Image: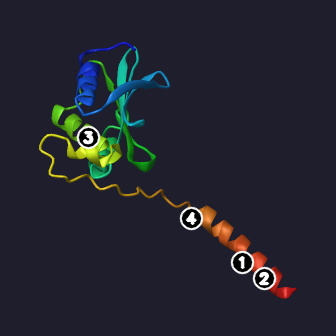
Amino acid sequence: MTTNKHVERVRQLALSYPDVVEGTSCKNAAFKIQNKAFLYLGCKDETYDIRIKLNDSLPEAEMLASREPDHYSVGMHGWTHVVLPHSKALPAALLKSWVDESFQLLAPKSAVESLPGSKGSRTKRKAVKKPVNKAKVTKKTKTVKKAAKKTMRK
């Protein structure tokens, strides 16, 4: 993987968390704790990208995605993708906050409690609800109702 100073900064931040190991996933670096990846880092010729899981920061990520869709996107289950040119860094405070949140969401409680300044609190793991496709629900409901009517007629 080609690196630049921004990629290396993200890498060093991820490795600063307790018990984190660096591996690979689909040609990208994957930073894991007990086999659970909390950050993926990729690097191409002109861009680098970061994937992290968010929960409390999703509104902020969604706002950035609406303003800069070429650089930010929010996917299913809170996984957020950031793609930046090598010349641009993710703001340090935002990067630290998001990586910390992703780590806390996926790391075991004991690892989170071992963080400096931790008071045993942990970012709550809330299920991110998947949008409901109303067309599918309506079609399925109609099919179930028809089947029920046929059964009642017999």
Q: Which residue is mark 2?
A: 149
Q: Nearer the viewer, residue 148 or 87?
A: 148
Asked whether the residues under the numbered discs 2 and 3 touch, taking CB atoms below 8 Å apart as contact, a structural biologist would say no
Quarter of image, res 44: top left
Above or below, 15 relative to 135: above
What amino acid type is highlighted by mark number 4?
A: Lys
Q: Nearer the viewer, mark 4 or mark 2?
A: 2
**CB under 8 Å between discs 1 and 3:** no
Q: Residue at x 42, y 35 (%)?
A: 35
Residue 124, image x, y percentages = 29, 56
Which residue bears the numbered disc 4?
A: 134
The label nearer to you, 4 versus 3, is: 3
Q: CA–CA distance between discs 4 and 3?
A: 32 Å
Residue 140 at x, y percent in the picture: 67, 67
Q: Which tag, 1 or 3, sits closer to the chain's start?
A: 3
Q: What amino acid is at disc 2?
A: Lys
Q: Identify the residue shown where x is 29% and y is 18%.
A: 86
State which quadrant residue 43 falls in: top left
In three-dimensional space, the C-alpha distance between marks 4 and 1, rounded to whole angstroms, equals 16 Å
Dot 3 corresponds to which residue?
98
Crowding near the residue tagged with mark 2, few <14, some 14–19, many ≥20 C-alpha atoms within 10 Å: few
The residue labelled by disc 1 is 145
